[in-house]
Image: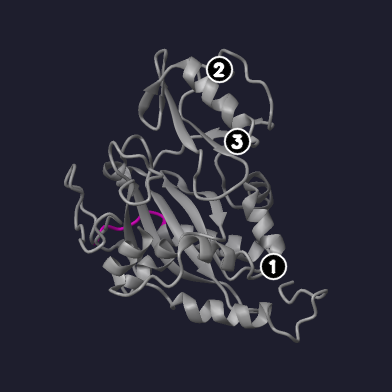
């Protein structure tokens, strides 16, 4: 699957499948940085002290906690639940309530079924119950199934140097599709970092097609300005400076009506998405030479194992 998508984008053999990329990226940079980003609660607490805004945390359910048969947050609307640890949005979903009916990622679900799902997830990890963010009004027609577009900003740095913005994407939900389906669960539109405007989007299911507008409602993509792009970029760079040194971090941010709000950072993101802006010529630099520099530092035979070069 990944090889097909890569060939459709670049016309060449896929050089680094997802599992290999994750293995490599997690071995580059300061291990403390990877550990911090893998803990979403710890990341939010540390970066909030640096003035970075995160969604309001309503509840923290500890792993193994027994949830009441009736939802403990009944009556609230606009919630988002995710596991405390991990990357990639696995087991994360939006919750809304209309009357007595709950909706999970826009689909109705009974209170009993929802409690059973929460109980199952609670056996695996702590659960974070946060406010659900609403997209900036200028992005309203890009919202699908009640899911706001996510701004994905890649920050990078060379060993010992200051971080910089490497690339930017806006990821959109597709109506009726599971947002975690790799091929057709989302559309991705690279952003020209010079002016904060979208390029034509694409679906990984059809990587050779470029979408100047959305097929389901005609909303314009190509040339559309992304609200709060400069502020979000500054936020991502500030976050990169605040964590232990890593070569590459993808920050997920939602532009809301009052400004950008940080969701999380990922240090081992998918290699296809990491390079997608480069297929449009909209990245600051290619990633392989940057990672090669980090590899030369991380795996140098002269390096002292007891003296980390990343602090």
Q: Which badge, 2 or 3, comes first in the chain's sequence?
A: 2
Q: Secondary structure at mark 1?
A: loop
- The answer to whether residue 59 is seen in the rendering is no
Q: Secondary structure at mark 2?
A: loop
Horizontally, is 154 left or right of 212 in the view? right
Instruction: Report the residue marked by disc 3.
Output: 128
Q: Nearer the viewer, residue 4 or 191?
A: 4
Placement of 299 over or under 220, stated as above or below: below
- Marks 2/3: CA distance? 15 Å
- The spot of residue 76 in percent (x, y) is 50, 22
Highlighted range, magenta:
223-228
Residue at (48, 16) in percent of width and height: 111
- Marks 1/3: CA distance? 26 Å
Answer with the quarter of the image where residue 242 lies. Answer: bottom right
Residue 268 among magenta residues? no
Q: Nearer the viewer, residue 228 or 263?
A: 263
Residue at (29, 43) in percent of width and height: 174
Instruction: Report the residue marked by disc 2.
Output: 71
Residue at (16, 47) in percent of width and height: 218
């Amino acid at each position: 699957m990944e090889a097909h998508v890569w060939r459709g984008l670049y016309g060449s053999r896929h050089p680094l499948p997802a599992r290999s990329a994750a293995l490599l990226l997690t071995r580059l940079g300061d291990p403390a940085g990877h550990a911090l980003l893998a803990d979403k609660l710890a990341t939010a607490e540390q970066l909030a002290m640096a003035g970075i805004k995160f969604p309001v945390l309503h509840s923290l359910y500890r792993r193994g906690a027994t949830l009441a048969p009736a939802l403990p947050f009944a009556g609230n609307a606009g919630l988002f639940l995710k596991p405390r640890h991990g990357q990639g949005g696995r087991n994360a979903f939006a919750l809304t309530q209309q009357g007595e009916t709950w909706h999970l990622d826009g689909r109705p679900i009974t209170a009993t079924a929802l409690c059973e799902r929460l109980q199952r997830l609670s056996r695996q990890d702590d659960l974070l119950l946060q406010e659900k963010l609403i997209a900036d009004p200028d992005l309203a027609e890009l919202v699908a199934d009640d899911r706001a577009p996510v701004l994905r900003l890649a920050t990078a740095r060379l060993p010992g140097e200051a971080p910089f913005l490497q690339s930017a994407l806006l990821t959109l939900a597709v109506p009726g599709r599971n947002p975690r389906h790799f091929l057709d669960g989302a559309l991705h539109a690279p952003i020209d970092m010079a002016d904060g405007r979208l390029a034509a989007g694409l679906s990984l299911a059809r990587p050779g097609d470029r979408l100047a507008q959305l097929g389901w409602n005609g909303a314009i993509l190509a040339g559309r300005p992304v609200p709060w792009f400069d502020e979000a970029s500054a936020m991502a760079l500030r976050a990169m400076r605040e964590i232990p040194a890593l070569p590459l971090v993808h920050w997920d941010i939602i532009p809301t009506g009052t400004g950008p709000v940080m969701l999380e950072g990922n240090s081992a993101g998918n290699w296809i998405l990491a390079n997608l802006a480069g297929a449009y010529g909209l990245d600051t630099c290619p990633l392989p030479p940057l990672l090669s520099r980090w590899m030369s530092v991380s795996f140098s035979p002269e390096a002292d194992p007891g003296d980390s070069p990343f602090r």
